Image: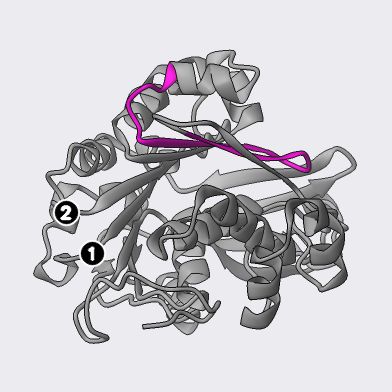
Amino acid sequence: MSGPIGVAVADGGGAGSGPEVVCVGETMVVLAPDDGGSLEHAARLTVGVGGAESNVAAGLARLGHRAAWVSRVGDDPFGRRVVAEVAAAGVDVSLVTVDPDAPTGLYLKDPGPDGTRVHYHRAGSAASRLGAADLARPGLAGARLLHLSGITAALSGTCRDLLVSALDGRALPGARVSFDVNHRPALWPADRAGPVLRDLADRAGVVLVGLDEAATLWAADDPAAVRTLLPGPELVVVKDGPVGATALPRTGPAVFVPALPVDVVEPVGAGDAFAAGFLSGLLRGLDLRACLRLGHLTAAPVLAVPGDTAPPPDPETIARALALPDEAWTEQAHATGGSGR
């Protein structure tokens, strides 16, 4: 079959055969001042939905993949809103558990002159009760990719058990496992998170990590140093914001693709969109250079809006950008609306 970006797709089964990709983790309701000012002086708040793993699922769904999101929400209005909004992005939410005894998580954005701070209200949330049993579902059998994040490791002991089971291949046998480090300092400091996240990342097949995260967590100051610290994965992707991203396979040369210029409105969610684009490329059998380009192309629209997600460029724009010679990549992709991060 052909995918929406005009390249061959190695499909995981027929349209009714279940999800191709499974993303696992917490999604919360987000409250933010509607005037862009500080929480302290806000008169009104806007209500949204945000979660790294469901953002990746939404991005993959928009790129034409059958994506499912596995999580838990409370039996409350916020939980129903979360599920409805994730489903509206084309994601399968049929395996989300509604917990009558725990609430849906909540976080607040507090914009300021030095950036946006985040305040979490998620301790004891329904998603903190996730465990290995949440992946023991017949409906998930046959998935080609299981996507996880380091955020889940900070939520509870049962959440960490889920990650270990998944990363050791017990949860979805045969599925490739990707892991986005996604360190959240507001959940746990670097000295506690660093060793745990390094151990989890080294068990994954594909790892995505920001160079700034790697420097904070592991004192790794370049992509090669990150690769040395993580010898286990078949592939490590190091993102360096507006500079670009480097893919480092276990064997073979590293591949760097520069980011494309974009007027940044808010960076939240762009890393998830990059992950969705890159993972889509892997699922489609693209080479690493094209996977990185697709990551930049899907991240750019998110950088240009105040929300956490945005539709990717149209299939024709993506196909043209993926086919560009290296020297034309930055200029031409920007001119055709496919600006990367």
Q: How many marks?
A: 2
Q: Residue at x 72, y 63 (%)?
A: 324
Q: CB atoms at circles 1 and 2 under 8 Å apart?
A: yes
Residue 51 visible? The answer is no
Rendered-image quadrant of the N terminus: bottom left
Number of residues whose C-alpha sits closer than 10 Å to that of mark 1, classed few (under 14), some (14–19) or many (20 or more): many
Magenta residues span 229-248
- Placement of 60 over or under 2, stated as above or below: above
In the displayed structure, would residue 137 be above or below residue 327?
below
| Label 2 residue SS | loop
Q: Is residue 191 magenta?
A: no
For disc 2, the neighbor class at 10 Å (few under 14, some 14 to 19, many from 20) is: many
Where is 115 relative to 199, above or below? below
Position in image of residue 155 (x %, y %): 37, 40
Q: According to the image, label 2 marks what residue?
A: 172
* Tag of residue 143: 1
Nearer the observer, 64 or 114: 64
Name the residue rendered at 65%, 17% in the picture: 221
User: In this view of the protein, can residue 123 be seen by the observer?
Assistant: yes
Image-based side of 94 in relation to 226, left or right: left
Residue type, mark 2 in image: Leu
